[in-house]
Image (spheres, helix red, strand yellow):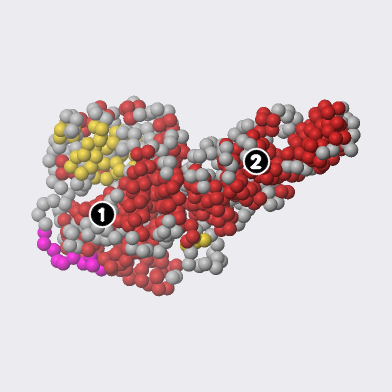
Amino acid sequence: MNRVATCPRCKTVYELDEDDMGHLMECECGAALFACRTRSLDVFEMWCKACGNDHQVRGVDVGREIEADCGRTICVPSVLLRLPIGDRELATRANAEWQHRRGAGVGPEAHGRRPARHPSNTASTAVESKAAKHAEGGKVTGGQVTGGTRAVAYSAKPGGISLRSEGMSQIPSDNIAEHGRARELASDVGGQVRKTSPSKRHLGATLGMGAVVAFLVSAVVMFLLRVPPSQKRAKRSKATGQSVISDGKPLRNDPELQPGMVVVGDGVGLLSDNLGLSGLPATKVADAIGPDRDGGNYLLPPPTIYALPAPKKTRDRIAVQTSKSAFPSLQIAMDAAFEKYGRVQKLKEKADASGLQPDVDAYQQAIGGTIGVIEQVHQLAVAKSAKKETATTRYLLAFLYLKAGMLPEAAVMGEAVARWGELDDPSTKEAGLIALAATQELSDTHWGDAEDLGELRQMERIAKILQSRWPDDRQIDLIWMNIGYLYEAFNQPMNAVRTYENISQSSENFRTAVLASGMAEWNALRHQQAANGITIGRENWKRVKQRLAKGLRLVEKDASPLMVDHVVARLALAQIDLIGGNPEMAEEWLTVEPPALLSSIRVRENDEEESKLLVDEALARQLYEVLFQARHEQGDTEGATQAIEDLAELVGDSGEELATRRISILKSAFENLKQKDDIQEADFESAKKIFNVLVKDSSVVPTATLLWLGESWAQIGEHIHSVEQAEKSELAEEAARMAAELFDVAIKRNDFPQESLQAAQLRRIELLRRCGEVMQSLKQIEDMLANEPRVFTLQIAAAQCLQQVAVEYERSSDLLAAIEGPSGFS
């Protein structure tokens, strides 16, 4: 008999004993493994050292030498080490050890050598200590590999906990063939079936089905009511006292455009470079798009990273009382098993009714005793190759194991019944649901490596068994949806996509699955972009767009009410079109009927329009960010401005974000005015309207921003003069007037740098003269010359003003003063 088994993770080879079956082991790589027989498996994977690959072999070929796909002759083992099994402590240690080995570059070949060992006395002491600890708690647990070559296992027995060290000895991988023998053995469930009296398993069928279905329905309800990614991100932000904007950066809790805010952007010092005035502080145009964006490109916000689910508290395992009863026949043994099982059900009803601890203790003690008896009956049924009795006892054990907190055992037994049980027996499918429930509870309580979700893969295998044997059961679709949600919760969206694809087009859940699949793949692409810094390829986002659009059409064609998932999907489609260079379509996803998305949402629970869909503020900000950018890229200044105003009305006009968006719009409006030879009054008024909103409370506008605004208006006025648009002279004067007022406000600020004061005053003097306020300009020059009479620049400015006054008012004295140089003013 070939009792050689390989660790599925590190490929270390071990030889197991009969007593190791059904126990939990820990490999030297840290992996928590469950030892089981392969004869009862239809197909399993066996590792071949020659080619380094896994090959699928049949359980009926146990003990035979077969030719693998690689051409190598291998002996099919009778035992198997399976993942994932174990408690959280073992799983966590396994993950840490595996990550260490992977980082050190240790591969499967490294395990062929003799592993590093701890001193034997240390290993023995550790195991004995752990055994004593579990003995005090009355728990049954597995063993661990210690010293590198021996496994010490312990199990609960009537006399206490006994240690053994003769099992699971490690052997060199080159000697695998020596331990295998070409022996043909009968299947443990094969042979002639003896006739027995009608089965009594119906005693617990209803209770088993009710418990499992309730567990499954609760998981599905959690999926359907899950919080969307944007809401989770917003809730996490609120917990830390921050707000979240569309690009994921926290907002400062300061008023709009704080006085100390640094205005940065395209790096051009407008005053110093363009006007030849060296004394002014450098003013740089504000860029609301962010340091990593071009003004015309939309930057996707960072993807949602879920906080890994907190492990739930593990249920205490009920101690199993080993039975040593002697049964003269299998039928008498089955009758005894059903009698014990029926007593458990009565004690459960009593404990549920009274709620008293003594009744609960009696119920749990009865479960442990009943498991011991049924395990003995199951061994007898297997020995006699009685298929029906074997399936019956496995179903009873699966249910009782689940009640006793023995989750790995429940999963194994339930899967076996679901795989090979009779289709027309209701308990066959119930056993599969029990296995599914046990595996999900294992995932909730025992996961140790978020990158290696063995429990979820096991749930997939069970779901595939159920789907292949009961393809018309609608409940299977909900199982797939639940597994997909669990993958997303562990930040594995591509595995979620693969899971959602198991739902057929004829299913009523198909449209929901398509939409969820599209969102999961979109999230996966954004994860890749954030991790690798690689732009999402055109083919990728086109594929995602097609899937999302298809799912959205399916869910909206029946005039179903607007839901948050629909809003998130439309936002994703708008984002895809925006980064794909189609801002017109991006705008349509958010504004065109149906459902006129932006007019159908609210962010406050106490909103008067209760018919609107309630969404969190972070999601609303992302929607309007896309709309703003789409209109901005189309050159629709008025529309972009309206988007900002609508957002301000929806969430409240506060925070730096809205101000920077207005500055971005204003920047584009200014550039548009300065580049046109034929300036339209409508464009001028549009820019002025945005400007008025921005500076309605100038006290909160930073000094640097005031200077930038003032110089921008000054350059617009000069541009109008340069293109000689006489009919637009009033616009030029108005631009100069607004610029002069902005410089005046900035100069009077306490934080204005004194070394730049004179240059700013000269600029304001020039602007006053250009807007027709010549006398006010002269008054400013007079005040400055009184303090600094020898400033040549001021004398030139005064001469220009006197010349303008003399020409306009026909005053020869002022003209003479302008020619000879001002010594005073008439």
On screen, residue 475 above or below 30: below
Expressed as whole percent of the image width and height from the top left, the position of residue 496 reads 35, 48
Reading the image, the residue beneath label 2 is 726
Towards the viewer: 51 or 248:
248
The answer for how far apart the CA atoms under marks 2 and 1 are is 71 Å
At mark 1, the secondary structure is loop
On screen, residue 732 above or below 597: above
Image quadrant where one finds the N terminus: top left
**Which residues lie in the magenta part?**
194-204
In this picture, residue 640 sits left or right of residue 15: right
On screen, residue 820 above or below 336: above
Towards the viewer: 386 or 262:
262
Residue at the location (32% across, 66% down)?
Answer: 210
Q: Is residue 85 magenta?
A: no
Residue at the location (13% across, 46% down)?
Answer: 186
Expressed as whole percent of the image width and height from the top left, the position of residue 685 reads 61, 49
At mark 2, the secondary structure is helix
Towards the viewer: 106 or 608:
608
Q: Is residue 198 magenta?
A: yes
Q: Residues within 10 Å of mark 2 (few under 14, many from 20)?
A: few
Residue type at tag 1: Ser
Expressed as whole percent of the image width and height from the top left, the position of residue 181 reads 16, 35
In this picture, residue 766 sits left or right of residue 18: right
Residue at the location (27% across, 58% down)?
Answer: 507
Q: Residue furthest bottom?
A: 353
Residue 417 found in image quarter: bottom left
Residue 353 found in image quarter: bottom left
The mark found on residue 504 in the picture is 1
